[in-house]
Amino acid sequence: MTEQEPSTNSSMTDKSALRALYEYYIDFCNAHDFQAMEKFYTAPAIRINDEPWTPSRVTDQFRPLVEGFPDWHWEIRHFVIDDNFLSLHFRVTGTHLGVFQGIPPTGKKVETTQFTLYRVVGGVKFDAVWDMTDFDSVIKQIS
């Protein structure tokens, strides 16, 4: 055994743990369980796109989205782990059954993409998130 082998195995275990952590989190996201989601964010603040937010402010941003699309769902398409960073590419879907950004319900199904980078601290909390979601395509689909 070389000295690198244990490190590689440890790294694989760490990656498995980080993937499991994220899969646990995304289950709460897809269940729209905001209270459970907040437990994954550092308190009193997490950085969202380089700005400090409280954990409740993070989940509050999802409320209008879920009101407009009660079945809003994130599906992981690509997942890359690099040290303590998680990079994700999502396929996001939902049905427009409530008012969203002033647009009354249309009943239309929508699909868009999202790219998100998370930084994990202590192996258990997200302390920074950088996110890009194509909401322009969502608006076009329901207009």
Image: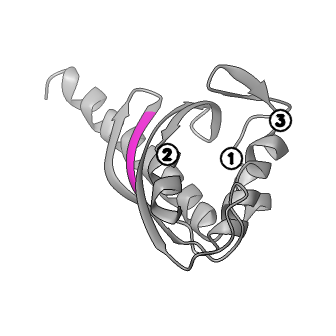
Label drawn at residue 57: none
Q: Between label 3 and label 1, give the one nearer the viewer.
A: 3
Circle 2 residue: 136
Upstream in sequence: badge 3 or badge 1: 1
Identified by mark 1, the residue type is: Phe
Is 142 in the magenta? Answer: no
Using residue 46 as the reference point, say whether residue 107 is left or right of it: left
Number of labels in the image equals: 3
| Residue 108 locus on image (x, y percent) | 49, 75
Q: In the displayed structure, would residue 53 be above or below residue 72? A: above
Element type where label 1 sits in the image: loop
The residue sitting at the left extreme is 1
Q: Between label 2 and label 3, give the one nearer the viewer.
A: 2
Q: Between label 2 and label 1, give the one nearer the viewer.
A: 2
Q: What is the span of residues highlighted in magenta in the rendered image?
A: 86-91
Identified by mark 3, the residue type is: Thr
Circle 1 residue: 40
Label 1 Cα neighbours within 10 Å, binned few <14 / some 14-19 / many ≥20 = some
Per the picture, the main secondary structure of the magenta-coloured stretch is: strand
Front residue (pair 83, 7): 83
Front residue (pair 142, 117): 142
| Residue 18 locus on image (x, y percent) | 46, 44
Q: In the displayed structure, would residue 58 be above or below residue 33? A: above
Q: Residue at x 56, y 37 (%)?
A: 123
